[in-house]
Amino acid sequence: MDMSVITRKITPGSYETVPDILKVMVLPSHEGKTSFKFNANSKRVKIKTEKKSKVVLEEGPSDLLAFFPYVVEGVAESSFVADPQAVFPVFYVYSDTFQPVVVGHVEAPL
């Protein structure tokens, strides 16, 4: 009986949708043992584990998938709607002046 723990870190990148996040969470070595599905209509995530597999959702990933932090054994569905934009709001700040630069005899913004 193998009780080893396999961890998975989500690689840095831009994940705009829940299916994008779920794709990087899948371990090829655990195909058939764990599955992650997103229902586009209800916007909820379903996690299914087989045999002695578990999925540990810690704070952060659990927020992204609309779960409370806990260990999934069997089948679990998210408690609320999964929306990455709700968890991590994005702000874009534009500025026309970063540092004044002297051009000729005139100081001009970049």
Image (spheres, rainbow, N blue to C red):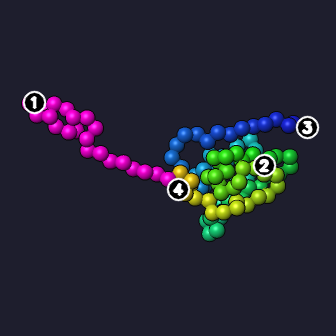
The picture quadrant where one finds residue 103 is top left
In terms of secondary structure, what is the magenta stretch mainly?
loop
Q: Residue at x 56, y 53 (%)?
A: 87
Residue to which mark 3 is pinned:
1
N-terminal of the pair, mark 3 or mark 4, is 3
Sequence-wise first label, 3 or 1: 3
Dot 2 or dot 4, earlier in sequence: 2
Looking at the rendered image, the quarter that the N terminus falls into is: top right
Report the disc number at residue 71.
2
Q: Position of residue 31 (x, y in %)?
A: 74, 47
| Disc 2 to disc 1, C-alpha distance | 65 Å
At x 68%, y 39%, the residue is: 8
Q: Residue at x 69, y 55 (%)?
A: 67
Q: Amino acid at mark 3?
A: Met
Which mark is drawn over residue 104? 1
Give the magenta range: 89-110
Determine whether the residue tagged by mark 3 lies in a helix, strand or loop: loop
Binning the other alpha carbons within 10 Å of mark 3 as few (below 14), some (14 to 19) or many (20 upward) gives: few
Horizontal and vertical percent position of residue 16: 52, 53
Label 1 vs 4, first from the N-terminus:
4
Residue type for callout 4? Gln
Residue 52: say if magenta: no
Which residue carries the number 4 mark? 85
